Amino acid sequence: MSTKYIFITGGVVSSLGKGLTSASIGQLLEGRGLSIAMLKFDPYLNVDPGTMNPFQHGEVYVTDDGGETDLDLGHYYRFTNASLSRISNATSGQIYDAVIKRERKGGYLGKTVQVVPHVTDEIKSRIIAAAKQEENVNVVLVEIGGTVGDIESLPFMEAIRQFRYERPKDCINIHLTYVPYLKAAGEVKTKPTQHSVQALREIGIIPDIILCRCEQPLPDELKGKISLFCNVPQEAVIDEKDVEKSVYEVPLDLHRQKIDAMICRMLDLKTPDADLKEWKEMLDIVLEPEKPLVRIGIVGKYIDHQDAYKSVFESLHHGAIANGVQLEIVRFESERIFEGGNVEAAIAGCDGYLVPGGFGERGWEGKVLAARYCRTNKIPYFGLCLGMQVMLVEFARHALGLESAHSTEVDPNTLYPIISMLSEQKHVQNLGGTMRLGAYPCDIAPGSLAYDAYKKPLIWERHRHRYEFNNEYKQRFEEHGMRFSGTLHNGVLCEISELKEHPWMLGVQFHPEFKSKPTAPHPLFVQFVKASRLYSQSNPQKTDAAHSSC
């Protein structure tokens, strides 16, 4: 059987959820026994999102092979079993960079280099590469970022047009649009969808399925109107309404509308009905109404951006699923904590606190205050990457008496460089793609909190950082009750630290949030939520925290 290709485009507005939709369709196809691969094209000219501001781009998702990629790959990972690597994400910057480098080496034999065919050929080669990253891939789902009509996405659209022309029986296009409800008029409007499909057809791409993002299910009358003016069968006009409680409802909602059966029919894929038993069982736990509440505080500097800590939020929800509890996430802007001075008044009321990864000086001292608050009050604390570094600097200042202890990232001249730059990073000039990136092995010490979570002596986790704990201070830390329970396999670099005289205070140098699924929660998040639940049960008279939650 030849490999099949599904192209997912978006229209009307951005942020419609193409990534979630692509991931949901991928899961449904896997449920039918198909092997899938996934690819995200991003039209921006950055080579990768590694140096982009999280306020603009959201989180940077990291793959095992060290690729810094779009956050939609996190959706792909959580919803499917597709292999994800550098090959699974390509930007305009990467495409043009490859074309220009080839031209400089004489690869085009002196020809005039043009968008068509050279750029479009490079795009098509990335699609083929995605199909070949594993053997016997049945379906490749290709998501094109941006909105139809954007000048940046035109080369990708042209490449898709050519790809479909070359393989007419092996490709379909799913177009995701927005069908707004105008409150003043009391009407749902289909005109934006009509215009979006018209723009797509002008490029030469005819949609096979139209997915309509909407607040409420669309009546058959409106589906018929979209069908008529967009030249798509009415059964292929599917509404994708806002889910009530969890994004994990999306695959089942699409399955109820038989999108997976329709795709298989269009691509001539002979499969059994989708087996979604495990997903349904997980969702039953998520939607169960009567569960104890656990409140987790996130202390970070990108709190106001919904997607900056996307994988962290989702991993906490996975931990809540495993523990059968209802989760409330409370966001705290770390810079405001420091400015306010009274940390207890600023953040009190949670059952556990998590400090996520990040870079730079802003908000650093607020995170230190949060770590001290958790240490002295025996409240569960989980530090991710920078969050572990904060935990160790706080301990050095207030438990070891090294008052000016710091990270050289923030204070290069500190007398006590508890956190310092990796030796191989000191002469790096380019910031993009030059950190310690990807999966590394880690040895776990028996009898530790980390071992209780993983239940095995060797693990692999993904990294994204330049600074590490300075081992010159290791003995002093251990003498005062800090345990370094995880170290780089066959090495000395600190990967996990935990405080002995504390119910659950643990930091990791890596990013466990990138390897958590709702059906397979990451063990550290499971244990952190469990510790927070136990704290909640032992402290029923907590002060309410008047902060926004998500």
Image: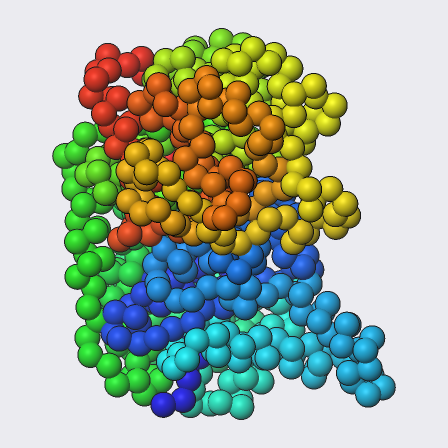
Tell me: residue 141, above or below residue 496: below
- Tell me the quarter of the picture where residue 253 sits: bottom left
Tell me: residue 339, above or below residue 506: above
Question: Considering the image in quadrants, where does the C terminus appear?
Answer: top left
Q: Position of residue 415 (x, y in %)?
A: 70, 19
Q: Position of residue 160 (x, y in %)?
A: 55, 78
In front of the other: 91 or 251: 91
Instruction: Mark yes or no: residue 180 visible.
Output: no
* Residue at the (54%, 77%) spot, across then down: 129
In front of the other: 221 or 168: 168
* Residue at the (31%, 47%) spot, across then down: 456
- Tell me the quarter of the picture where residue 277 sits: bottom left
Q: How many marks?
A: 0
Q: Position of residue 334 (x, y in %)?
A: 53, 24
* Residue at the (46%, 23%) spot, across then down: 478
Tell me: residue 509, above or below residue 253: above
Question: Considering the image in quadrants, where does the N terminus appear?
Answer: bottom left
* Residue at the (30%, 57%) spot, across then down: 250
Tell me: residue 521, above or below residue 420: below
Q: Is residue 524 left or right of residue 427?
A: left
